[in-house]
Image: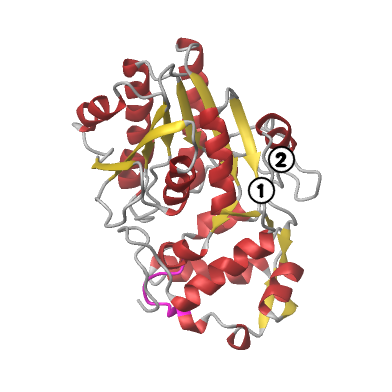
Amino acid sequence: MSTHAGLRVVVTGATGNVGTSVVGALSEDPDVAAVVGLARRLPKMSVPGVEWATVDLSRCDSPEVLDQHLAGADAVVHLAWRFQPTHAPLITWRSNVLGSIRVFEAVARAGVPALVHASSVGAYSPGPKEEPGVSEEWPTHGWPDASYCREKSYLERVLDAFEPRHPRIRVVRMRPGFLFKEQAASEQRRIFAGRHVPGPLLRPDLLPFVPDLAGLRFQALHTDDAAEAYRAAVVGDARGPFNLAAEPVIGAPELAELLDARVVRVPRALVRTALAAAWHTHAAPASPHLFDAVLRLPVLDCARARDVLGWRPTRTAQEALSSFLSGVRRGAGMETAPLAGSRWG
């Protein structure tokens, strides 16, 4: 790490759900002197100690921009990710996979001492749905039919090759569950439900039941809690992968309690058929392949993050989901292009 008065940290994807929380956490840390937030579009928001700049990682000229901003950096937090268009996987591959490789190569060229990469629970191979969950040693081959999982898994292999070639670079891989906060709700509604689903309709009195599907058990985490894990990784000396999730594991009963609804057993094939029809007709952006992946994601054991990073979430999984639902109904957002608020499509 740097020997000067404070760390200089570069964050890619700094204007999204995770990026805005990570930038905020780093800006408040006394060990961090400066933060450079990189995004495709400049935000209107202002954060003390944060400098904004633009880069499009899908472009062939992005390495020149990265070299300019990574020079003299003490750490790079790589969060940039493009979820859509799900019907054009070549576009997401160029941004997510080729763009990430450009970031990794720029880190090596600049001799940045630390790289903190946003992996995901989606990188894991299908696994058990029960506690205590899988450790970071669980295979990361993803669910190959889903672009998101396939891309996250591929980058795990890229880093497997990167680390032996650059042993002086401290590489950290964060593998969180689903990340929610109120200000990102409008963005997430647009990504997964589409622009034409009105947020005010997501009220408990209009959602009378929760489908009880085989495999519907997942882990959630408030984005600000995840940001604290990223901050700890930047200012500390940890290496390797870390699972991040809050308790409890969310299933149909927990969702029903949150929504004040009843649980109804529904055949998984019926729900998938409906999702597939909506996706193929472009009525919904979330693909049925991602639905297949979610039902196969393993439950995570987060003991390593507690023991090595000293990290513990301050909010429960229900509180994270509640923040999201509140944000959807209100059309909450922030002054960045990805998080622009909207109650209606």
- Write down the quadrant of residue 242 in the picture: top right
Is residue 253 found left or right of 67 in the rendered image?
right
Label ID, residue 245: 1
On screen, residue 195 above or below 53: below
Query: What is the magenta segment's predominant secondary structure?
Result: loop
* Magenta stretch in the rendered image: 192-199
Label 2 secondary element: loop
Q: Would you call the spot at circle 2 few (<14 residues within 10 Å), some (14-19), or many (20 or more)?
A: many
Tally of marks: 2
Per the rendering, the mark at residue 332 is none
Name the secondary structure under disc 1: loop
Q: Residues within 10 Å of mark 1 (few under 14, many from 20)?
A: many
108 inside magenta stretch: no
1 and 2 marks in contact (CB < 8 Å): yes
Q: Is residue 198 magenta?
A: yes
Image coordinates of residue 284 in percent, x first then y, are 42, 69
Residue 9, position as x, y percentages in the image? 40, 32
Q: Amino acid at mark 1?
A: Ala
Left or right: where 328 falls relative to 214: left
- The residue wearing badge 2 is 302
Let me know if residue 265 appears in the view: no
Q: Give me the residue at 67% from left, 49% from top.
A: 313
Between residue 100 and residue 305, name the one nearer to us.
305
Q: Amino acid at mark 2?
A: Cys
The residue nearer to you, when weighing 79 against 4, is 4
Q: Earlier in the sequence, mark 1 or mark 2?
A: 1
Residue located at (39% from left, 45% from top) = 81
User: For residue 151, what is the image quadrant?
Assistant: top left
Report whether 225 appears left or right of 258. Answer: left
